[in-house]
Amino acid sequence: MNTGWQRVLGLSCIRLTGVVLQTVILLVVGRIAGPAGVGTLQLFLAWTCSLGELAAAGLPTHAMRRMVQADECRASALQYFAKATSRLAGVWLVLMLVAFVLYAFGWIQSGLHLGFVAVSVFCFALYRIASESLKAVGQVDASVLVESALPPVVAGTVIGTRYFLYGEITSLDVIGAFSAGFFITAFVLVLRLLKYLGGMSNRRAAAPNIAWQEHAPYWVTALVSIGFLNYPFLVLPYFATLAEIGSFAFAFKLLNLSTTILLMLGAIYGPRFAKSALSGDKFGARRLLGQTQKLSLMLYVPMVVVLLVGYPFIHPLFGDGFGDALPILLVLAIGQLCGAMTGLSGQLLNMSGEGAKEMNIQLATLAIAIGLTPLAGNAFGAMGIAMVYSLTISLKSIASLWTAYQLVGRDSPHFTKELV
């Protein structure tokens, strides 16, 4: 078997292990707490990941590109990681100050919930930087395994222990369990990164500088990207009940396959895109982009067909109240299909020094989503939000693919060599 295919299949198994574990958690919460419990969990994860990307300040993407250029120099890599972590901590402290003010004025009701979110946000941002750094230096398998599987494993262990001891779980138990998962994941990934860097050469190197303008485009792009991913759960509370949000979350989680596939491919192809840009290899970048399109479709289509055909047999496993989510699942699947067809075009732009173009595309399509949300939400509720989400994902994917081929297509005048 071709080694490239072996790599893809191996990482697919790792990523799918994480998806299976997350699905098991969803099953447990759904059977014990119903759609409302699933809705509460999804809202917590949506806000944690969104604020985590805000705290990360675009540094995960920047770290991947910088670590590719580390040239086996431990001193430079360690100094970069220390500076990136320090910058993350500064942004996180500002966010916590704002959250404390909101809590003091009564806009945030529960201090305990806020504490769990605060820990989760910092740990999520930290392990994103550590994970992308590991991928850049060739530690793809380890980073993908830990970031995809460890959070649900820890959360499931905590929830299972709690249920075994007390016979019930509350929404606070679920949130606390996932907070523990984020904390342990960050600890393991940082430890892994430091151990790897300790084995690199220790030649002298100038302290790396991290200018805000270098990672600011990635920051905005990451925020808009995570905003797209979590958009439904940021606006659904205004148009749907908690139980309806839970049903939407159920369909959304089942379609995590497409997101998982793109993340898995990104772990492999992100550093390759960066190296192609560094060497000015336009043909190589175009070939890599085509590979991601083919692989995305080949992995996504069979899985989503199984989900749609087998839905009548799948949803009863998760408890009562999820049977009406099939139309939402179908609408969401159409948008994700478009995303799979366009491959990693957005990541190619980011890794080639064209992050500003990807940022503008995402901002434009997010503006479309915001404009359509009140009309669709008031008219069709959760289904309206699903339609807006699929439409904007499709528009964004097509625009990114077109821009990527303008950069690396046969008739393009040049391909950037400069990594900024």
Image (cartoon, grey):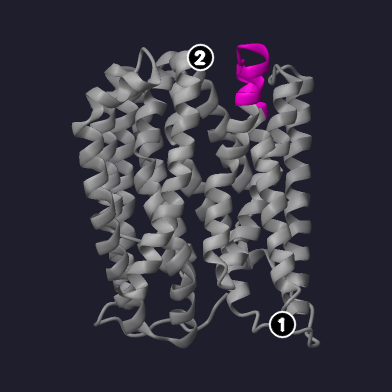
The quarter of the picture where residue 228 lies is top left
At label 2, which amino acid type do we have? Ala
Q: Find residue 73 and name its label.
A: 1
Magenta run includes residue 64: no
Q: Is mark 2 on a helix, strand or loop?
A: helix
Residue visible at 53% across and 21% down in the picture:
40
Is the C terminus in the top left, top right, bottom left or bottom right quadrant? bottom right
Residue 302 location (% of width, % of height): 22, 47
Q: In this view, does 49 lie to the left or right of 199?
A: left
Q: Find residue 279 and name its label.
A: none
Q: In this view, does 238 lie above or below 403?
A: above
Residue 256 location (% of width, % of height): 39, 41
Magenta run includes residue 165: yes
Can residue 234 be seen by looking at this rendering?
no
Q: Is mark 1 on a helix, strand or loop?
A: loop
Is the N terminus in the top left, top right, bottom left or bottom right quadrant? bottom left
Q: In this view, does 259 lie above or below 141?
A: above
- How packed mark 2 is, by other alpha carbons closer than 10 Å (few <14, some 14-19, many 20 or more), is some
Residue tagged 2: 33
- How packed mark 1 is, by other alpha carbons closer than 10 Å (few <14, some 14-19, many 20 or more), is some
- Between 91 and 190, the one lying in front of the other is 190
Q: Give the range drawn in magenta.
A: 160-176
At label 1, which amino acid type do we have? Cys
Of the numbered discs 1 and 2, the one sitting upstream in the chain is: 2
The quarter of the picture where residue 277 lies is bottom left
Pointer 1 and pointer 2: residues touching (CB < 8 Å)?
no
